[in-house]
Amino acid sequence: MNKSSQEIVEEFLISFPEYIDHYYEHIKYYSELLQHIFYSETINSPLFDLLKRNKEKTKILKYVSFIENMWSQGDDTVRNVVDVTILERLSDENDVWSTLGIYISEDFRNYINGELILQNIAMSNVSLI
């Protein structure tokens, strides 16, 4: 079953209740969920910093697990957020990208290396993970 963006954001807010207020502020400001902006602020920014330091492994795993859930359970719109917003940003710095590789599943790694990097022109210079 492919979950909609609404179903995924509901799961996100259960997994990351610290972002509930941020979600409502986002909706108030934009009048709708703009996934690329919302997840850039709530996943990309904190995860990028965590991967750069590579110290809080439990937190890193929590974010990575959620991203993999978005990728494996989400509909095409949700998967686009994973590809275009989350993974493209994490691939901007080699040290962050290679650290991410420590935490992802083999299936996700195969997808990134075998499909995403090959098909996404913005990631054409990104090394395999």
Image: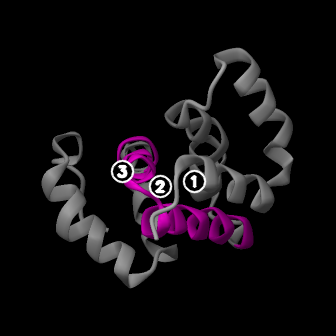
The residue at which mark 2 appears reads as 96
Find the distance from the CA under tag 3 to the CA under tag 1: 20 Å
The residue at which mark 1 appears reads as 52
As drawn, the label of residue 83 is 3
Q: Which residues are magenta?
A: 58-86
Foreground residue among 75 and 122? 75
Residue located at (43% from left, 41% from top): 85
Q: On the picture, is 110 further left or further right than 16?
A: left
Counting from the top left corner in percent of width and height, residue 15 is at: 76, 62
Marks 2 and 1, the one that precedes in the sequence = 1
- 85 lies above or below 107: above
Look at the numbered discs 2 and 1 and tell me whether their residues touch, using CB distance below 8 Å: yes
**Quadrant of the rendered image containing residue 38:** top right
- 10 lies above or below 107: above
- 7 lies above or below 31: below
Find the distance from the CA under tag 2 to the CA under tag 1: 5 Å
Mark 1 belongs to which amino acid?
Answer: Lys
Residue 29 in view here: yes
Mark 2 belongs to which amino acid?
Answer: Val
Foreground residue among 33 and 58? 33
Find the distance from the CA under tag 2 to the CA under tag 3: 16 Å
Q: Secondary structure at mark 1?
A: helix
- 112 lies above or below 123: below
Asked if residue 108 lies in the magenta stretch, the reply is: no
Marks 2 and 3, the one that precedes in the sequence = 3
